[in-house]
Image (tube, coloured by chain):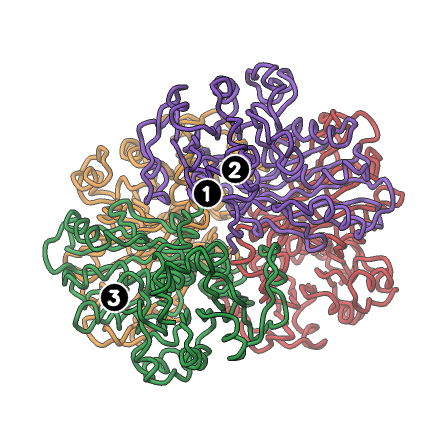
Chain colours: A purple, B orange, C green, D red
Amino acid sequence: MKLYNDTYFDLKGIVKLKTVIIGATGYGGVELIRLLQNHPHFEIGGLISSTKAGESIQDLYPHLAHCSYSLRELTLDTICELGECVFFATPAGISSQWAPLLVERGKVVIDLSGDFRLATEQIYQAWYGKDAAPQRWLDQAVYGLSEWFTAQIQSANLIANPGCYPTAALLALAPVLQAGWIRTESLIIDAKSGVTGAGRTAQQAMSFSEVNDNLRPYKVDGHQHIPEIERYATELAKHEVKVNFIPHLVPMNRGILVTIYADLEDQYTNQDLYELYRETYESKPFVRIVGQRWPQTKQVQGSNFCDIGFHVDQRTGRLILLSVIDNLVKGAAGQAIQNANIRMGFAEEAGLTDSPLFP
Amino acid sequence: MKLYNDTYFDLKGIVKLKTVIIGATGYGGVELIRLLQNHPHFEIGGLISSTKAGESIQDLYPHLAHCSYSLRELTLDTICELGECVFFATPAGISSQWAPLLVERGKVVIDLSGDFRLATEQIYQAWYGKDAAPQRWLDQAVYGLSEWFTAQIQSANLIANPGCYPTAALLALAPVLQAGWIRTESLIIDAKSGVTGAGRTAQQAMSFSEVNDNLRPYKVDGHQHIPEIERYATELAKHEVKVNFIPHLVPMNRGILVTIYADLEDQYTNQDLYELYRETYESKPFVRIVGQRWPQTKQVQGSNFCDIGFHVDQRTGRLILLSVIDNLVKGAAGQAIQNANIRMGFAEEAGLTDSPLFP
Amino acid sequence: MKLYNDTYFDLKGIVKLKTVIIGATGYGGVELIRLLQNHPHFEIGGLISSTKAGESIQDLYPHLAHCSYSLRELTLDTICELGECVFFATPAGISSQWAPLLVERGKVVIDLSGDFRLATEQIYQAWYGKDAAPQRWLDQAVYGLSEWFTAQIQSANLIANPGCYPTAALLALAPVLQAGWIRTESLIIDAKSGVTGAGRTAQQAMSFSEVNDNLRPYKVDGHQHIPEIERYATELAKHEVKVNFIPHLVPMNRGILVTIYADLEDQYTNQDLYELYRETYESKPFVRIVGQRWPQTKQVQGSNFCDIGFHVDQRTGRLILLSVIDNLVKGAAGQAIQNANIRMGFAEEAGLTDSPLFP
Amino acid sequence: MKLYNDTYFDLKGIVKLKTVIIGATGYGGVELIRLLQNHPHFEIGGLISSTKAGESIQDLYPHLAHCSYSLRELTLDTICELGECVFFATPAGISSQWAPLLVERGKVVIDLSGDFRLATEQIYQAWYGKDAAPQRWLDQAVYGLSEWFTAQIQSANLIANPGCYPTAALLALAPVLQAGWIRTESLIIDAKSGVTGAGRTAQQAMSFSEVNDNLRPYKVDGHQHIPEIERYATELAKHEVKVNFIPHLVPMNRGILVTIYADLEDQYTNQDLYELYRETYESKPFVRIVGQRWPQTKQVQGSNFCDIGFHVDQRTGRLILLSVIDNLVKGAAGQAIQNANIRMGFAEEAGLTDSPLFP
């Protein structure tokens, strides 16, 4: 696969690179389908589903009535036949078993699940309650926070695509963590998410009647995205970071907003923040610094943007950061394609240039 | 039970009449709990659940955290001990077996399911796909459309509480059917319902992500409320009535709106309609004639009202009727209590005098 | 402008055709922006707003924070400078004055408002309560129901883009109207729309608190889309057609569902319907015949599709047609671009190939 | 008015005490109407509206179609004639002028606006940007946080009913503030509210299309409830407290959830919290301690309950408090009636005993 970077200019416009989606029947999977269908350099080589093999995706999703994709069995040979770049949009505990085999067969793997995001087997097992991938594969995986690990992604064969909450939180936090502007022991992340984050599911607690006109905190005693945030916050801050992270379920389909609170190390102003954030993200096409025009979730709906706002409260010496993404795009399928673009040497924005759908 | 009518004045203020709710864990059941808790003459004697016996209702429904009801087993002796007036808020196929036994033991039964609403065993089996109650019990049951069968309800021991759609449709239709003002062969009922009509459920198709911001027709090829509407429309019109009835699922929790279309037999005006409807429903506390201030569902939310609007289209000679109810109140638990009030000789409005919750 | 058809192949890939959006600050306008931004052959030459000239669109719409469009004054010279193909996304009463002037200056005009859809000045004034465009311009305008007036659109300089409700209704009705399969005097259209149909507005009746969890019929005594539907239904049926059309406001942002009822002329079956509809729309990329998998609005969200379902009720001899569109896409901006594609000789699907956003 | 406490037992059941609602056409006003209609000891003496005098409330609110209230002019004599207990459900800046006059005429005034909640004229003017009530009236007003200022309320003639956010926040915070268990300099309040908090309004930003499926932070740089929270938090903690308070607008009608973060002074456990909170609120009918069954907003919908949950995070030594109310009931009209009950010597729960409406 290494050669794609070299031969990109020859390939452009001539053939498209074949991709495979494993776990194609979930919301992450169908979002990958939507985005890959209009991609200039990728095409869908095949869809895999362990539970729905033999069915056609358009029977499961009527919005795809104009398509004709059949779901294939999950076997190594099938995947290898169907494409070169493999996306896992599976629940925790699947890619840990399959991704290493595919990388060994020369494929590039982008894993949207949490299986390769944590540092050690022990931590994974503690937070996910499942068997971890072998340590050497955890070590080999590259964290796909596109804007911050670009160089590593360019040559990675196993990319751990970030969780939706960590993406929103870390993109907002990274500049001040790296600059050392905040007291990390004071870090609080109050997160709010739309309902698609829970996946396509048949649960009473996720039924319309129970969720509509309702707001609900959940996993107040511990969400599996905490160790992921702490791992990379620590890496960016260059000292150990612990956070409180409390997620809430909001009656809307898509969108995450994180509201982050941290004590400032010094008397920074909103102007200082503007400078830091604009400079940091100047060349990044998907991060929009909106500053004191505090972002709302719908302004990124259906797009790969992350919009970041902030406010320095002079009364309390505290910084408030606000960050929004579409959890299915920048928080999942969109960032996965952004990472695939980076890996293959395509333009980072390729296939991701649609403006948000509003309203 | 007959004596309650006689002794009501003595009982008033001294003791409350004990009720039992079977199927207390569904939305109809908890709505009965809500309404009975503040009733001046009824109290909750016990709650029955075949699937959750032994649990407490407040564990299943956090909004009842201030209560202390335990769910009891479904046995004949338990029910008989717990109260005199028994509400079935069960799925189809339960009350057909149990209600006759209770009536034979001297209880008054109000059945919120469809088991006793249809004329014959054959019709029930055809539309519900289940074994019907014995024909003699179908014959004995009184249809609990409170405003139209008041006299029969006063002495009934087995009351078939109407379905939510039939309630909204028949209350709107009854005056013109009885008056012979419409050509019944042209009758079309386009119905729209909130999601609680589907009950408390764990279905992918009812999950928030799939229902929110979406509108969906369903059972276009036949809904089990069709024979119920046709039976009583026929009775009111005094000739056979067939209808098209198409339900739609609206992304809201409560509320039904039916939009009814029918060719007029003669050149009636909106003024004629006002007179007919006001006269018909003059003494009925829960029917509000709103005429050309076309009703919206939220104006009856949480209340037992049925609001009826109309418009005569002079261009086409057609009548449009609009009728809204809260499907869980006038379409289920509220009308059940209204019927219990009528049966026991209490004021028809007792326990049902709350204004709607708006907005 | 005539030359564009001839020179399309030369232009392709070399330059893009400049478009102007008048009324760019409404929901129809920003949807045009979204779709034109990714169009292979069109680009945005300029945005016009009579009320917000001088402001930038990204200040009015934060989802466009990555753009840099300024709103220009509404003057003839400005428009003429900015582009060749002009879209009016204005309220009724604007394009009637401006479009003729632009056509006379050699521009192609696509009008998303209702100003050129009706047959006579009298009818327009009666239903819109405003001064009509001159009769000769009404006569010259071509109705832009893309699938049915393709030939006329190819050479039109003034295209009256259909209303959202008429698009959904006529696409569903046209095959049976043309085939003479239904008794048109029995035609009833029960329509349901999301809230964006009302435009970007500051009205109490459209506030979230009043609309959420609520369903509301409106304009029961006459909606301005009635004469538009009747005009083209009459043309397709080749005899005069009158309809009842009752719209309802559904608590969702996008989407229209029309449920159409009509008596069948003969004993047609669902199979007959499948054949008729599949044959009729075989070559039309945006009409998906879903038959008895009755369509829901979200399955076309953000896309230019119109999905059509149906059911023959053998009990009543009546046909039920179900048709869904996204009111801002196929019901407005999408169909406008489809018409522009047809007019310019581009591929009909150009710029409109995104799959729907689901969920 | 003092005598009502003495003569309550005589009055009970004989006459009802007349109330007047000023600002009856807002959401707070109609919620007062809903609750007072079923109150055992109060009745509605009259409704006042400065903008809609002469109209009838049922024309403005179709859910009240069964009522017959006319709106009266705002004059001192009118109010004095109509009743003894006066509720202000007006925007800021009205009651500051009128309430003193009414108290001087012997009325009991309960003010749902913010005019009498802050300590000094200067602070009010700084946060509300309006002229304050005279300082001696600010001094005289009693803060109506029913559970914490009961004794003062019993003899107050001017009750400043708390804001919705301060009610939710202070009821959760008071026990730990009073006990000295938290480091108040670390206090962060992340608040989320439904849309009715903004009142009945015609604003584009509050339109359904803009709010639906969207989550939006607002007033990040300062909300007028901050000084109110800080004033009473300071009083309870007995030292100066400053907070960060960031509100968010959630796409739902009713309900507030506050998520509060604070460093613990010592190693308290969840069990310690249970004991403290249960003991504190043991005799308070409207506070339900739900502990680690974290509360969701809908579980209090339409009711006067405040449900409080919590979690001690041992990893960070931080306490998370969760508190939900219905902003129009416990956050406005319900608490106002609770305060009126306390003031008049009625049972604290009188008229407020309905269970929440769920779902």
Q: Amino acid at mark 2?
A: Ile
Q: Position of residue C350 (x, y in %)?
A: 39, 55
- To which residue does mark 2 refer? A337
Q: CA distance from mark 3 to mark 1?
A: 59 Å
Q: Amino acid at mark 1?
A: His
Q: Nearer the viewer, residue C2 or C353?
A: C2
Residue B176 is labelled as 3
In the rendered structure, the answer to whether residue B331 lies left or right of residue A239 reads left
Query: CB of mark 3 within 8 Å of CB of mark 2?
Result: no
Q: Amino acid at mark 3?
A: Val
Q: Residues within 10 Å of mark 3 (few under 14, many from 20)?
A: many
Task: Tell me the SS state at disc 1.
Answer: loop
Q: Nearer the viewer, residue A176 or C231?
A: A176
Q: Position of residue A240 (x, y in %)?
A: 77, 26
In the depicted structure, whether residue B77 falls above or below residue C118 = above
The reply to whether residue A141 is in sight is: yes
Q: Nearer the viewer, residue D85 or D41?
A: D85
Marks 3, 1 in one chain: no
Q: CA distance from mark 2 to mark 1?
A: 9 Å
> Mark 2 or mark 1, which has the lower sequence index?
1
In the rendered structure, the answer to whether residue B159 lies left or right of residue B47 reads left
Image quadrant occupied by the N terminus of chain D: bottom right
Task: Tell me the SS state at disc 3.
Answer: helix
In the depicted structure, whether residue D304 falls above or below residue A143 = below
The chain identifier of the residue carrying mark 1 reads A
Badge nearest the viewer, 3 or 1: 1
- To which residue does mark 1 refer? A39
The chain identifier of the residue carrying mark 3 reads B
The chain identifier of the residue carrying mark 2 reads A
Query: CB of mark 2 within 8 Å of CB of mark 1?
Result: yes
